[in-house]
Image (cartoon, coloured by chain):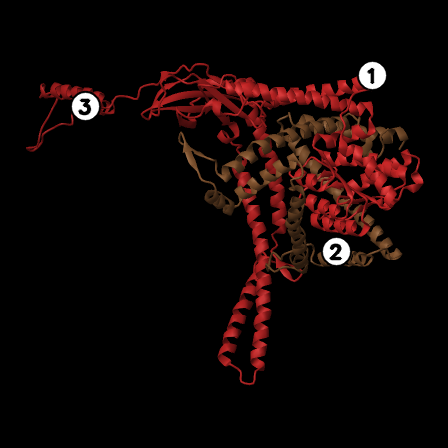
């Protein structure tokens, strides 16, 4: 392949597919949807092949870690044991997690349900502790903005917890002015914070994101942005 | 009317055949002899006939209905062969009035195919989510969509349905046979084992043995039945498979051929002209009917409801291209400072001073995500600085395609600054596609390697806080950039700098300062002005209740 073809072919492919799928949105014909789903199948097939590259990379990295006895190289052995163990069991069970005839779980299914799934859940559960520690740092009232954030966060936390609503009712006396009960309940305050300032900020950010992503797409379609192809010129 | 006809008919017979006679003391009526009786009977019959007219009048022919602005047209924005009808509502419509729609293939046909009947208070055009440039006037108009294929299904469709059902039954039989055989074999083994143990016992329980032997016998009979089934001739892996597979293959072929035929028939049905009549029903009686009006379905090539979106996209594209051209001429376009991007230099410098690596992550998305593409572009710019400062960069990946792209980008960056020798192939490496396994690995690496700087660019989900909080605990300078609005608060609390939304997309232009890229930022600003203007104008028109104008800025997906 000549250098010029190597340079222009990916841009031409990006342009053709980009323009087609942008236009596809405006054509109410079933064949365009079919083509879109066909291409997503191609993408999945290519991804499956690319997985081989990933495994080679993984193998390479951990093999050299073990060879060089880099810090924590023992974990690399665990990686290989897990990788080959799961592949072997998966092949033996033909990738089936549950026997459809007998309804019994296969060894592969057991490994997934009893090892992988709990490990995933464990990682996810750490999130709760991290949220607490991140919140502790973020909600220190060092500046005026941080104080507003702290107050808003406290209101939302109280408003979302049933106990918070009850405590607010006990602590804050209510009175009626022209048939309107004042002050508003903590639930109403929370609703206002979430629906008005929060939604407004999110809307503003979303607008910027949409325009940014459209501009980025146009740059890619017209071949202006080529850095993702491994060369800006 | 029927009564009159029958009476006249009987009377004629009586006259012709002179059958009313009296013989041997019975009533004798001869028309020739009793000249008075004949005319009397005739008069009575005439009177009766007139009564019968009064009692059961004939169904009147419905009057001609003239509907205001009655239109039959191809349903816009679809290509499945559907015809739409609309007409202006008649004043004073109420629950007692119903509309009926008849359809026929021939203008002079019988119109005996009633498509639907609905109360006059239902089926309004305003309920259809169409912009004004597609629907025209919406208020006070009735609207009905007639999917032609539902009214005139392809003739081969029932045959196709029947064959498809037959195929499904065969498949199910094969599946069940295999399952039953396996279960029976397992039961047999279990029973045999139990029986052997019972027989080995010192004091055998003969009653239980007998029961088990009986159960075993029944089991064997069932197994034999399966094996002796005329369909089950083939044994695969010790399991009898009903020899229906050949039949199944033939059926599958037939189904394929029928499907093609049905498709052809559908095309024929959709392409022809149809005639419609709309009638009014009052008190369950057809009172009026329109003349036949024709309509034809067409395969549409443009989504007219998306016209506003299309115009905006074209205008924005032209703006982007114009500003790029403008930026080429005027290279001193102003860019406001973005602290997060200014800190990139500081972060890489810090890593150089400390002799620790820089960690860069491209997020959870694949190469088809625009944010991942943006993250890979930013990686190129940061890798140039890393190469220039002779620092180490580590890019863990969860997508092999992204990894391959990033390898090329980092290699190119090292070459660009004249340090191709410093490039290490394994700086980009694959970890795993699993979200939390990836997080655990990268967290572990952060704890061990203690990077001086962490970059979190791209799209993130639940792992955002897990990664950034772990990075924060190592004391690294952290810069995040994402378009995931849900994760932004987490990055803001845990990172030193966060590129919010559009700043993230502006990063490549900001870092490179290439006029072409900077030009697109100007176009974005103009686009933002348009959107803000649309918001203000939309608010005003919504307040003064002018929904048609709002259609211009609505999404009709």
Q: Which mark is residue A228?
A: none
Where does label 3 land, which residue? B11
Measured in 3D between alpha carbons, the distance from the residue under mark 2 to the one under mark 3, in whole angstroms, is: 100 Å
Where does label 1 land, which residue? B329
SS for tag 1?
A: helix
Of tags 2 and 1, the one toward the viewer is: 1
- Chain hosting mark 2: A
Where does label 2 land, which residue? A87
Neighbour class for label 2 at 10 Å: few (<14), some, many (≥20)?
some
Do the residues at pointers 1 and 3 share their chain? yes
Q: State the red chain.
A: B
Q: Nearer the viewer, residue B20 or B408?
A: B408
Q: Is residue A189 left or right of residue B40?
A: right
Q: Is residue B85 above or below residue B217?
A: above
Q: Quadrant of the C terminus of chain B?
A: top right
Q: Residue at x 46, y 19 (%)?
A: B139
The image position of residue B354, as x and y in percent, is 86, 45
Q: Is residue B163 left or right of residue B528?
A: left
Q: Nearer the viewer, residue B403 or A75?
A: A75
Of tags 2 and 3, the one toward the viewer is: 2
Q: Residue furthest left?
A: B25
Q: Residue at x 46, y 14 (%)?
A: B69
Measured in 3D between alpha carbons, the distance from the residue under mark 1 to the one under mark 3, in whole angstroms, is: 109 Å
Q: State the brown chain.
A: A
SS for tag 3?
A: helix
């Amino acid at each position: 392949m000549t250098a010029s073809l190597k340079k222009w072919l990916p841009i031409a492919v990006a342009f053709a597919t980009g323009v087609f799928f942008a236009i596809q949105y405006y054509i109410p014909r079933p064949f365009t949807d079919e083509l879109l789903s066909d291409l997503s199948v191609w993408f999945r097939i290519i991804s499956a092949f690319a997985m081989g590259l990933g495994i080679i990379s993984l193998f390479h990295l951990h093999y050299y870690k073990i060879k060089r006895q880099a810090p924590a190289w023992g974990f690399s052995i665990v990686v290989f044991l897990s990788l080959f163990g799961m592949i072997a069991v998966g092949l033996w069970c033909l990738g089936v997690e549950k026997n459809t005839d007998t309804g019994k779980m296969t060894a592969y299914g057991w490994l997934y349900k009893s090892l992988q799934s709990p490990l995933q859940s464990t990682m996810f559960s750490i999130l709760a502790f991290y949220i607490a520690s991140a919140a502790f740092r973020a909600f220190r009232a060092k500046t005026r903005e941080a104080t507003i954030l702290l107050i808003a966060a406290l209101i939302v936390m109280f408003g979302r917890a049933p106990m918070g609503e009850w405590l607010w009712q006990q602590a804050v006396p209510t009175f009626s002015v022209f048939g309107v009960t004042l002050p508003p309940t903590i639930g109403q305050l929370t609703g206002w914070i979430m629906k008005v300032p929060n939604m407004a900020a999110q809307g503003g950010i979303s607008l910027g994101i949409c325009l940014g992503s459209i501009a980025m797409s146009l740059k890619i379609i017209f071949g202006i942005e080529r850095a993702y192809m491994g060369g800006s010129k | 009317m029927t009564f009159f006809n029958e009476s006249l008919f009987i009377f004629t017979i009586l006259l012709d055949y002179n059958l009313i006679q009296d013989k041997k003391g019975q009533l004798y009526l001869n028309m020739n002899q009793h000249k008075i009786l004949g005319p009397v009977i005739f008069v009575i019959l005439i009177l009766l006939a007139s009564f019968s007219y009064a009692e059961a009048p004939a169904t009147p022919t419905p009057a001609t209905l003239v509907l205001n602005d009655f239109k039959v047209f191809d349903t816009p924005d679809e290509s499945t062969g559907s015809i739409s009808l609309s007409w202006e509502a008649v004043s004073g419509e109420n629950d007692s009035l119903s509309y009926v729609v008849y359809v026929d293939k021939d203008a002079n046909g019988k119109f005996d195919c009633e498509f639907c009947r609905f109360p006059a208070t239902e089926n309004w055009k305003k309920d259809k989510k169409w912009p004004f440039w597609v629907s025209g006037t919406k208020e006070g108009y009735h609207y009905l969509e007639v999917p032609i294929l539902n009214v005139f299904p392809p003739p081969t469709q029932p045959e196709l349905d029947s064959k498809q059902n037959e195929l499904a039954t065969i498949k199910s039989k094969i599946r069940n046979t295999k399952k039953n055989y396996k279960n029976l074999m397992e039961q047999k083994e279990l029973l045999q084992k139990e029986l052997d143990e019972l027989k080995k016992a010192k004091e055998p329980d003969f009653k239980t043995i007998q029961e088990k032997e009986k159960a075993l016998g029944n089991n064997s009979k069932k197994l034999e039945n399966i094996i002796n089934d005329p369909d089950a001739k083939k044994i695969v892996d010790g399991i009898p498979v009903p020899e229906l597979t050949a039949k199944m293959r033939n059926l599958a072929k037939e189904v394929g051929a029928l499907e093609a035929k049905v498709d052809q028939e559908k095309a024929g049905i959709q392409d022809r002209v149809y005639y419609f009549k709309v009638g009014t029903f009052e008190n369950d009686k057809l009172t009026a009917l329109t003349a036949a009006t024709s309509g034809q379905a067409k395969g549409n090539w443009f989504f007219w409801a998306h016209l506003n979106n299309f115009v905006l996209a074209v205008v924005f594209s032209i703006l982007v291209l114009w500003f790029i051209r403008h930026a080429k001429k005027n290279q001193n376009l102003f860019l406001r400072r973005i602290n997060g991007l200014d800190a990139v230099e500081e972060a890489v410098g810090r890593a150089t001073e400390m002799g620790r690596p820089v960690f860069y992550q491209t997020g959870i998305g694949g190469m088809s995500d625009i944010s991942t593409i943006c993250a890979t572009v930013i990686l190129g710019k940061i890798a140039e600085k890393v190469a220039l400062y002779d620092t180490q960069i580590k890019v863990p990946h969860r997508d092999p395609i992204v990894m391959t792209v990033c390898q090329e980008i980092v290699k190119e960056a090292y070459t660009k600054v004249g340090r191709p020798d410093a490039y290490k192939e394994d700086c980009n490496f694959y970890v795993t596609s699993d979200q939390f396994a990836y997080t655990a690995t990268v967290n572990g690496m952060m704890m061990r390697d203690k990077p001086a700087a962490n970059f979190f660019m791209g799209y993130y989900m639940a792992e955002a806080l897990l990664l950034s909080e772990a990075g924060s605990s190592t004391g690294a300078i952290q810069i995040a950039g994402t378009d995931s609005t849900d994760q932004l608060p987490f990055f803001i609390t845990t990172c030193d700098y966060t590129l919010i939304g559009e700043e993230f997309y502006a990063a490549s232009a900001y870092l490179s300062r290439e006029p072409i890229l900077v030009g697109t930022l100007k176009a974005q600003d103009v686009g933002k002005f348009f959107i803000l203007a649309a918001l203000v104008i939309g608010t005003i028109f919504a307040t003064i209740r002018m929904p048609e104008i709002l259609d211009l800025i609505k999404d009709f997906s």
